[in-house]
Every structure is written in structure tokens, then in C-alpha cells.
Image (tube, rainbow, N blue to C red):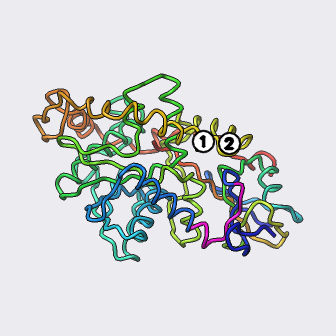
Amino acid sequence: MAKCRVCRGPAVIDLPRHNAHFCAEHLQQLCRRQVEQAIADHAMLERGDRILVAVSGGKDSLAVWDLLVELGYRADGLYLGLGIGDYSDDSGRYARDFADVRGLHLRTVDLREDHGYDVPTAARATGRVPCSACGLSKRHLFDAAAREGGYDVVVTGHNLDDEAAVLLGNTLRWDVDYLARQLPCLPATDGFPRKVKPLVRLTERETAAWCIVRGIDYQVEECPMAAGNKHLRYKATLNALEAASPGTKAAFYLGFLERMGPLLEGRSAAAVDGLRACARCGAPTTGEVCAFCRLVDVAAAHEPVPVEHLARRPRRAAGTASH
Amino acid sequence: MKVLLRNPRREVDLEGARTVLGLLTELGLDRESHLVIRNGELVPGDTRLEGTDTIEIRPVISGGS
């Protein structure tokens, strides 16, 4: 039986990138230390900060909320109801249950009830891919909730795999502005709260394991709108490299932060120069009306589109062919 | 053993014992993208799974960015 590298007790997980096994207790210790290091290395949080965690009901957002509370930070959550059928209903339930059990404060915004549209309808009405309509809505509404609620910082659950996959995409296109915005701590600028990603030193296998050993129920099913997207293809590519050479993802992304980060700092701040307030909602924008208000105009006027009309065909699932 | 797979959710029945890594390989699944839970407990790759075990193979990859 494999033993924990720290205590020699029975292991629950093998982590090839650390060339080690860990028991449940020392897996949690590893996760806490990685998050503490990310926060310290990038000056993400201060003890007195009012923190708003973007909560989806998935493993990463619940793990980062749990970890921050565990580390002594004061953090509320914000759940955004995206209107993606049963998937959103279940996700909201996981987020509410997590908050209820721990006595944490979860704010909620519902796209359909509060803004007159949902993600499938916005995608159809605007011609955007669903992930684009979803991302635009999330960024705008999390920023707005932080401003209105007096929060210092918005925390997201982006992990090492997320960031490595985005980095691969941005690098393949040499998109320098996007590379600059990928840093794990974006300082507050006029109209935008500080945004931080404390999980960037943890893989999603590790954040999922954190949830399992902590008894956190989360949304395991894949978003029906996301199946087969480019982000997943980048992740699959990186995981193939990781399998052949453990540590590749961490070396790729953390090396980017160490060596390219200093060269890119300031470029993300410069990108907000020249912004003005949206004539409708007051959010920072380069035009007269921000992209979110333009999306709402089109999507709220469109007849609701059921999620089944837009859901992507799932990838061929392993185990279905021969069993 | 009964094996629960996700995305889409489905169950398969397999005869005999094998290791966690052997099971993943047999199903064409990579270790970096999955965790294996035996009778409710997380288990590492070299764990021997028995025919009487109930197994969940949980994917850990999320599609959002």
C-alpha cells in the first residue's frame, strides 16, 4: 500500500508532479501551503480585505472559498444563476448547501430574473459562443456586485490547469494584452475591483481531491454548453504532456509568472487608460455603452432559447464503446 | 465491480480485481484528469480494487475559462 510522504500513513492520492503520495491530512496541508504561497508571492490579499468569491457550485470555487475561510480570511460568495437548465439548478443548490452548512453569506444574482435573459438565449441572440456570453456576463456582474457591496477584491477559482490552458492559447496567438491580463493578481483600477486567483498553484485534480477529503459536494457534471470547447482541447494537450513528463504544466505556467510576469506588469493597468463610464450602467468601457449593456439589449428582447437547442454534443465517453 | 462513470453518467460492471491505474488504462482514461473513489474513499493509483468494490471514476476537468 502506498504511504504518505509526510507521515507514512495510508495514502489517498498519488501526485506525480510532486513524485509523492499523500494521506488526506497532508494533502490538505499541501493545498493550504500552495494557496498561502500564491497569496504571498503575488500580494493577492490582506487580512482585513472584504472578499467576494465568485461561486459556481463547482469544485474550484467551493474549494477556494473553503480554503480562504480555513486560512482565516473573511469571504462572502456570489452565485450567478446562468439559466442553463438543470445544470444551473443543480449548481445553485450545491453553492447554497455549501454556504448554509458553514454559515457563510452567499449573495445571488439570476440572469433571467434580474436582467431578463439567460446564457443560451444570449448566445443565440448575439451569435456569440455560449462561453463568451457567459464570460462577459460573469465579469460584468461580479465587478458590479463588488463595487455595490463595498468589496475590496473578487476571488475566482481558476486553477493551474485553467491558467496553463489559457496561457497555451494566448501564446499560440502571441496575444500580449491577454497574456498581461492573465497574471493572478490584477490590481484595482478605476471602476474595477482587484481580482485574484489563489488556486493557481494547484491542479484541478488537487482541488477536486480537496473537496472529496473535506466532504464538499459539488457539481461534477460538465456544463452542457462547454463540451468540446477549445479550452478543453488545450487542457487535454497539456495533460498528455504532463503524463509523459510530470510537472510540465507547473513549469509552463509558474515559469511564465516568474520570468514574464515582471515584463507584463503595468501593461494590464495601461490597458484601462482611456476608459470612461458606460452611459447606462456606469461600468468602465471604451465605448459609450458597455458590452454587457449591449448584450442585455439584444438578449432580453429575444424569445427564450431552451438549453437543449444549444448544448454541444458531448465528447465520446470513455468506457461506452466496449462495455 | 460496479464502476460509476460521469459525463455522461453511466455504470459499467467489470469482473475480477485490478489496480486503479489498470482500471483507468482499461477504460482509456488518463490519471491526470481523474480521481478514483472506492466505497466512498479516495484511493491512489496502485490500490488493488476487488470485484466486490463499488468504484466511482470522477473526472476533474472543467470546461470554463
Amino acid type shown at disc 1: Lys
Q: Secondary structure at mark 2?
A: helix
What residue is pinned by disc 1?
Answer: A249
**A277 versus A187 height, above or below:** above
Q: CA distance from mark 2 to mark 1?
A: 6 Å
Q: Which residues are magenta?
A: A19-28
Q: Is residue A191 left or right of residue A9?
A: left
x, y percent for residue A220: 55, 58
Please tell me which residue is depicted at 48% across the width and 42% down the height of the picture: A225
Amino acid type shown at disc 2: Glu
**A206 versus A99 height, above or below:** above
Which chain hosts label 2? A
Please tell me which residue is depicted at 78% across the width and 50% down the height of the picture: B27
**A122 versus A30 height, above or below:** above
Q: Disc 2 or 1, which lies upstream in sequence?
A: 2
> Is the residue marked by circle 2 packed among few (<14), some (14-19), or many (20+) residues within 10 Å?
some
